[in-house]
Each structure stands twice: as structure tokens, then as C-alpha cells.
């Protein structure tokens, strides 16, 4: 298998890099310090059509695959930018494009592609169920010509920066469903029409992430906000999640490359004890090791992306890509921080900011432990721990 980039893919990478070059370290430093949302950056990517590349051409997008989307997100994070501000629009496309009705696609996709509608919020996690998604309790009850939703979500990002939100809720109680994954349904919520039914409370976290707790009280949704069939939402979300894992892996790979590049550059410039610190193997080898791991993770990521784009099963590969990329980026982050010594902690070097941003990808949207449990149980056939 050849996973080297085609000419078109190289052009994508260069075009995204050119946009990112207009948003230097100083921009991201200020956005981080102010806990602000990078509106200008997201607008530039939207205008360039980069956030809608997964939308089919007949709905105004570029009709490209997760492979190309992964190149976009990798390049964003590699440039020093923070893809989290805009990645959800790509994560959610797998669910909407593959499982949405023709009417839903006609109604929303052209406007999303044109940048008139933002679909940047994805509400799964709940305070009591955490990683065990099948135990979530937010309930959408069908009452005549509408659903009425009640429940609570936590760590739901970019709600204030979105017009639409994908919501995973129960439509049948867990104890009545034939298996744990049944009875969950996906809804496309128009946040502009939610009024006071969703109480949004920001959560302050260690990085600039615009995440929130949601208290949902009697939220009324029209029947046509349901995506696909009632009760089959977990399967639809899983489809989207495989894309999400590949895309998150790509962001981690971008971060990893940034850490390795910055670390190597600093190691080649900084002189202590009369020589460049990069000449010391204690500094050089961790960066070289991290580089090798980032490159290896990148290949698994492309393999997973290629399988996804062909419509083939890619659960194991997508999860492994996320696991390996998160670990490689984490290792690169440590090496870069250590290489910078005390300066790594000074915000003007950007290492501490990137470090905080990269760390999240080891936990969200799925933690390394849950991936290992998936591999151990589903791929290797060992007994289940949960
Ligand atoms: C900044 C931020 C943004 C986020 N944005 C979103 C968002 O937009 N939408 C959304 O839906 N969610 C979002 N999340 C939530 C994120 O996906 C969850 O935090 C994550 O899935 C873990 O869930 P939890 O925090 O409840 O941890 P828990 O499920 O409580 O787990 C805690 C720890 O225990 C480990 N653990 C649990 N069970 C097992 C087991 N059986 N075996 C081994 N280890 C186990 C986990 O791996 C984890 O390390 C966000 C989180 C953060 C921090």
C-alpha cells in the first residue's frame, strides 16, 4: 500500500498552510490568554471551503474523503494553530451525510458548505455515564408531532459558536432495549430555536476550549430532527466516531510534528556548556524517538482513513491511529518541553500552550484506556472489563 500524498493532497496541505501562515504564534497566544474564540481563523478556513470538504459536491462541498480532511487538520495543528475550534464540523459529517435523510441534507448541507450555518457541537458525554455511552440517560420522549427532551450533558464544546448540534439521547429505556446499544437516537438540534430549554453553563478547563455543561429541560424537537431510524443512533454515531478518531489522530500528529520541529530547532540553536544542547543525546534521542512514533502513527492514520473512505470496516485501525497518535504527540510534547528547559514554561515560546492543547487528545473524545479495552475485547477476543 502506498500512503504517500497525491499531487492534489499536497496542494491541499499547501493551501491550508498558506491560510495558517496568516495566523502566527502571536495570534494564538492572544486568543489563548483571552480565552477567546478564533473567529477570524475559522472564517478564513470556511471561506476557503476547507471545513466543508466532506460535504458531497451536490450539496456544495468538495466531496472529498476523511483522508483529505485528515490532511487539513494535521496541517492546522502542525502550524501551531488549534484545530479544536473548528474540527467538529468534520467529525459530525459522517453521521449526517451517511445517515441523514435527503430532506435533511438538502436543508442543511448547502448552508453549512456556504458558511451560513455552523455545525460545531456534538453532545454525547453525560456526568453520570462518562465513557459508558450506552448508559446515558438524556431522554427524548415522543409526544404526538414532536419529541420532548430532558437531561444533562457535560463538556459539550462550542455550543455558543454553533447553530446546530448533534445530540445523542435515549428514546427507549436501557432496560427495555434488547442490547445496550439499542434505544439511542441521534437528533440534529437547531440551537437557535431551543430558547431557554437548554441552559448552557461554561466550564473552565486547562486550555482554551469553550466547553459547557448543558441542562436540557423540555426541549421540543420536530420529528424531522431525528437522524435515520429511531433507536439506531449508536450505530450512526459509531460511524461518525471512526471518522472522529482518524481526524483527532491527525490533529495529534500535527501537534507531534510541531513539537518535534520546534524542539529540534531550539536544540540546534541553544548553546550551554559551550555546545548546542541538541548535540547531547539526552536531548536529541527523545526528539528522534518521538519523530519516529509520529511517522508510524501517521501511517496507521492513513490506513484507517483509506478504509473509512472505501466504506470498509475500520474500527480497529481508527482506534489504533488515535491511540498511537495521542501517545506519539504526548511523547513529542514532553521532549519539546524538556528541550526548552525553563523557557518551555514561558508562554512566549508557545510550548506550554501547545502542551496543554495536545494533552487533551489523550483523553477526549476517547481515552487511551477505552481504546485498549476495545482492542483487547473486540479485536483480540479477550474477556470484557465492563
Ligand atoms: C475540553 C473537553 C472538551 C470536550 N468536548 C466534548 C464534546 O464536545 N462533546 C462530548 O460529548 N464530550 C466532550 N468531552 C468529553 C470527553 O469525551 C470525556 O471527558 C471523555 O470521553 C471521558 O469521559 P469522562 O470524563 O466522563 O471520564 P470517565 O468515563 O469518568 O473516565 C475517567 C477515567 O477512567 C478511565 N476508565 C473508565 N472506565 C474504564 C474501564 N472500564 N477500563 C479502564 N479505564 C477506564 C477512563 O479511560 C478515564 O481515564 C470533552 C472533554 C473535555 C475535557
Image (tube, rainbow, N blue to C red):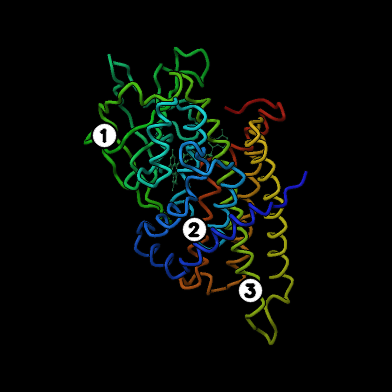
Q: Residue at x 25, y 34 (%)?
A: 193
Dot 2 crowding, Cα within 10 Å, few <14, some 14–19, many 20+:
some
Is label 3 in a helix, a strand or a loop?
A: helix
Quadrant where the image shows the N terminus: top right
Q: Are marks 3 and 1 in contact (CB under 8 Å)?
A: no
Q: Are marks 2 and 3 in contact (CB under 8 Å)?
A: no
Q: Is residue 16 left or right of residue 279?
A: left
Q: Is residue 198 left or right of residue 256?
A: left
User: Which quadrant holds residue 167?
Assistant: top left
The residue identified by callout 3 is 265
Residue sitting nearer the eye, 377 or 318: 318
Q: Residue 25: where, in percent of width, then height?
A: 47, 69
In the image, the residue with mark 3 has its CB under 8 Å from the nearest atom of ligand 1: no
Is label 1 in a helix, a strand or a loop?
A: loop
Dot 3 crowding, Cα within 10 Å, few <14, some 14–19, many 20+:
some
Q: Is residue 191 above or below residue 283?
A: above
Residue sitting nearer the eye, 226 or 31: 226
The residue identified by callout 1 is 194
Q: CA distance from mark 2 to mark 3?
A: 21 Å
Q: Residue at x 57, y 41 (%)?
A: 245
Q: Residue 80: where, in percent of width, then height?
A: 52, 63
Amino acid at each position: 500500500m502506498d500512503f504517500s500524498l497525491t499531487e492534489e493532497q499536497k496542494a491541499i496541505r499547501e493551501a491550508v498552510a498558506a491560510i495558517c501562515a496568516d495566523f502566527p504564534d502571536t495570534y494564538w497566544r492572544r486568543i489563548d490568554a483571552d480565552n477567546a474564540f478564533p473567529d477570524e481563523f475559522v472564517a478564513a478556513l470556511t471561506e476557503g471551503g476547507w471545513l466543508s470538504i466532506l460535504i458531497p459536491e451536490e450539496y456544495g462541498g468538495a466531496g472529498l474523503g476523511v483522508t483529505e480532511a485528515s490532511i487539513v487538520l494535521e496541517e492546522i495543528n502542525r502550524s501551531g494553530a488549534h484545530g479544536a475550534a473548528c474540527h467538529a464540523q468534520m467529525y459530525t459529517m459522517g453521521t449526517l451525510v451517511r445517515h441523514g435523510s435527503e430532506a435533511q441534507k438538502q436543508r442543511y448541507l448547502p448552508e453549512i458548505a456556504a458558511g451560513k450555518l455552523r455545525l460545531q457541537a456534538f453532545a454525547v458525554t453525560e456526568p453520570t455515564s462518562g465513557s459508558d455511552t450506552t448508559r446515558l440517560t438524556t431522554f427524548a420522549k415522543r409526544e404526538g408531532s414532536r419529541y420532548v427532551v430532558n437531561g444533562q450533558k457535560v463538556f459539550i464544546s462550542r455550543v455558543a459558536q454553533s447553530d446546530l448540534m448533534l445530540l445523542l439521547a435515549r428514546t427507549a429505556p436501557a432496560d427495555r432495549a434488547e442490547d445496550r446499544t439499542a434505544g439511542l437516537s441521534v437528533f440534529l438540534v437547531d440551537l437557535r430555536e431551543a430558547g431557554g430549554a437548554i441552559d448552557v453553563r461554561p466550564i473552565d478547563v486547562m486550555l482554551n476550549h469553550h466547553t459547557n455543561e448543558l441542562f436540557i429541560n423540555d426541549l421540543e424537537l420536530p420529528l424531522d430532527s431525528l437522524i435515520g431510524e429511531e433507536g439506531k443512533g449508536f450505530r450512526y454515531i459509531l460511524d461518525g466516531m471512526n471518522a472522529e478518531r482518524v481526524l483527532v489522530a491527525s490533529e495529534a500528529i500535527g501537534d507531534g510534528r510541531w513539537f518535534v520541529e520546534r524542539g529540534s530547532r531550539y536544540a540546534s540553536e541553544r548553546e550551554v556548556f559551550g555546545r548546542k544542547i541538541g548535540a547531547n543525546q539526552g536531548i536529541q534521542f527523545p526528539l528522534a524517538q518521538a519523530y519516529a512514533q509520529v511517522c508510524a502513527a501517521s501511517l496507521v492514520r492513513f490506513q484507517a482513513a483509506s478504509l473509512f473512505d472505501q466504506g470498509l470496516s475500520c474500527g480497529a485501525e481508527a482506534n489504533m491511529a488515535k491511540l498511537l497518535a495521542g501517545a506519539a504527540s504526548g511523547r513529542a510534547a514532553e521532549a519539546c518541553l524538556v528541550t526548552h528547559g525553563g523557557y518551555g514554561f514561558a508562554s512566549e515560546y508557545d510550548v506550554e500552550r501547545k502542551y496543554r492543547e495536545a494533552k487533551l487528545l489523550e483523553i477526549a473524545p476517547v481515552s487511551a484506556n477505552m481504546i485498549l479495552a476495545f482492542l483487547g475485547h473486540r479485536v483480540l477476543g479477550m474477556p470484557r472489563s465492563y
